[in-house]
Amino acid sequence: YGILRVGDGYGTVTELLNATSVTKLIRNNPDDLTQAAKYYIDMLKNIHSIEVEDGIVPDMKETALSWADFVAPHIPEEEAQKLRALMEAVPKKNTLMHGDYHTNNIMVQNDEPLLIDMDTLCMGHPIFELGSMFNAFIGYAELDHQNIMDFFGYSFETSEKFWDLSLKMYLGTEDEEVCRNVAQKAMVIGYTRMLRRALRRPNDADSPAKIAHCKKRLGELLRETDTLIF
């Protein structure tokens, strides 16, 4: 309902929403995810239709390159070089992205999806957004499915189905091979981010397993992936 200046930046003033989250819609009807996914993807397409000027929000490509540089000493040199090259080849885009786009951050009020928690706004090629989405629905819970239940309140199996359906809606196709190919590109981004996160938390009890898992999956994906562009 308003925008105010905070130091050198800006803040928003909003009213408490009388709304429900897409997460709750999924929990209430896990057997039919179509409407929840439609709200979710309609908002995502709306966000991605906006172009922003340089310097307004962070450039996600630069951030992702910093992840690649961080993990480089911890993976085989050939993989590190290919990972860096793949990210470098992603064209610069000024497409607005949310940066933390999951179902807790989309509310529905009077049949209209509304976006919250916008402190992660950024810009770049949508593959970086999809990488973050993969992590939210699959990546962070692959080794412990309870993480999905704890965060969203629905099952890992439901989360997998929602990710698949959302990707098909976003890409506008039912072609399984097309969706698999784009998902694979998103996973390269996702595992790079997760590997960096685990490496920065060496004292966490589950970090060794996460590091080993991310290294394995990233290596497999890099052997199969020649571009991150779709």
Image: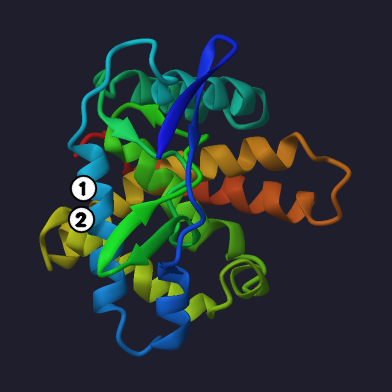
Q: Which residue is mark 1?
A: 45
* Amino acid type at image mark 2: Tyr
Which image quarter: residue 40?
bottom left
**Residue appearing at x 41%, y 20% in the figure:** 57
Rendered position, 118 above or below 208: above
* Amino acid type at image mark 1: Lys
Q: Which residue is mark 2?
A: 170
Is residue 136 among the parts visible in the rendering? yes
Q: Nearer the viewer, residue 159 or 72?
A: 159
How crowded is the residue under tag 2: few (<14 C-alpha within 10 Å), some, or many (20+)? some
Question: From the viewer's perspective, is 12 left or right of 226?
Answer: right
Question: Which quadrant is home to the N terminus?
Answer: top left
- Dot 1 falls on a residue whose secondary structure is helix
Question: From the viewer's perspective, is 80 left or right of 121?
Answer: right
- Dot 2 falls on a residue whose secondary structure is helix
Question: From the viewer's perspective, is 229 left or right of 160?
Answer: left
Q: Looking at the image, do the residues carrying marks 2 and 1 touch, with CB atoms under 8 Å apart?
A: yes
Q: Position of residue 84 (x, y in %)?
A: 44, 22
**Residue appearing at x 69%, y 52% in the figure:** 210
